[in-house]
Image (cartoon, grey):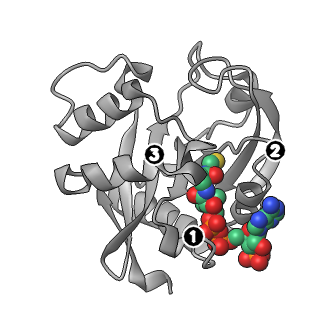
């Protein structure tokens, strides 16, 4: 199954598909569908020539394809030990390499509940390390504590539950999330 999964940097051909995923009820429950987030996605797609006021434009967006059909979205950013970094995150940063945070969803309903989530995440971590940043050796993912399905599939994909924290900024401010980590 894994060799049928590919990733592409989000581009203008994906934009409407991504926005339709963000508007789906199953994604809206756990993802930010705000106009600010959509503007940030547009800015990324157009090459980040203008600044973004959505987390200062730190995110990159990737589309997962199965049999060449888009079905999933991955959002990444490099984690630094700056003021916005929660203490639990700071304590678990890679010492030698890069730490990457991941947000993930399966957007297309036909691909939901088909056992694709864990293989997609495993394939994404490999893709990112091999083709985007060879120094990336530590991957964070932070499901909402109520998102038992996500927590389960992340464990299947090799992420270990480290602890919990409350988001200090952004759309999910104050909400308790788990920090789960996969190390290569
Ligand atoms: C989370 C998400 C990526 C999982 O993808 P999926 O296609 O639903 O998952 P899969 O079919 O690959 O696997 C589902 C697994 O979770 C289990 N599961 C389903 N509901 C569950 C629940 N409420 N509690 C615990 N496990 C659950 C299934 O039994 C299955 O486990 P198994 O393979 O060991 O039998 C997807 O549901 C999604 O994108 N949801 C909306 C956005 C989201 O929540 N993103 C995560 C934000 S951190």
Task: Tell me whether circle 1 and circle 3 mark residues in contact (CB < 8 Å).
Answer: no
Element marked by disc 2:
strand
Using the numbered discs, state the Cα–Cα distance from disc 2 to disc 1 in whole angstroms. 27 Å
Q: Which residue is mark 2?
A: 162
Residue at disc 1, CB closer than 8 Å to ligand 1: yes
Element marked by disc 3:
helix
Using the numbered discs, state the Cα–Cα distance from disc 1 to disc 3 in whole angstroms. 15 Å
Query: Which is nearer the eye, 176 or 107?
Result: 107
Please give the label number shown on residue 9: none
- Crowding near the residue tagged with mark 2, few <14, some 14–19, many ≥20 C-alpha atoms within 10 Å: few
Give the left or right position of residue 50, taking residue 169 as reference.
left
Q: Residue at x 73, y 41 (%)?
A: 144
Using the numbered discs, state the Cα–Cα distance from disc 3 to disc 2 in whole angstroms. 31 Å
- Crowding near the residue tagged with mark 3, few <14, some 14–19, many ≥20 C-alpha atoms within 10 Å: some
- Crowding near the residue tagged with mark 1, few <14, some 14–19, many ≥20 C-alpha atoms within 10 Å: some
For marks 3 and 2, the one nearer the N-term is 3
Please give the label number shown on residue 23: 3
Judged from this view, the residue extending furthest toward the top is 83
Please give the label number shown on residue 112: 1
Rendering quarter of residue 45: top left
Q: Residue at x 73, y 48 (%)?
A: 180
Q: Give the image location of residue 146, x and y in percent.
A: 80, 44
Give the left or right position of residue 136, taking residue 168 as reference.
left
Foreground label between 3 and 2: 3
């Amino acid at each position: 199954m894994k060799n049928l999964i590919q990733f592409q940097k989000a581009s203008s051909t994906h934009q409407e598909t991504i926005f339709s995923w963000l508007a789906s009820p199953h994604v809206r429950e756990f993802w930010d569908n705000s106009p600010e987030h959509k503007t940030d996605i547009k800015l990324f797609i157009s090459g980040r020539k203008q600044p973004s006021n959505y987390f200062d434009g730190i995110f990159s967006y990737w589309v997962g394809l199965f049999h060449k059909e888009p079905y999933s979205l991955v959002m990444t950013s490099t984690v630094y030990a700056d003021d916005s970094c929660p203490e639990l995150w700071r304590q678990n940063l890679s010492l030698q390499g890069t730490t990457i945070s991941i947000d993930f969803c399966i957007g297309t309903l036909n691909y939901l509940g088909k056992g694709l989530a864990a293989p997609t995440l495993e394939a994404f971590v490999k893709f990112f390390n091999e083709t985007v940043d060879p120094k990336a050796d530590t991957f964070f993912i932070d499901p909402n504590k109520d998102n038992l399905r996500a927590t389960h599939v992340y464990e299947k994909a090799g992420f270990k539950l480290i602890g919990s924290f409350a988001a200090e900024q952004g759309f999910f401010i104050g909400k308790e999330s788990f920090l789960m980590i996969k190390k290569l």
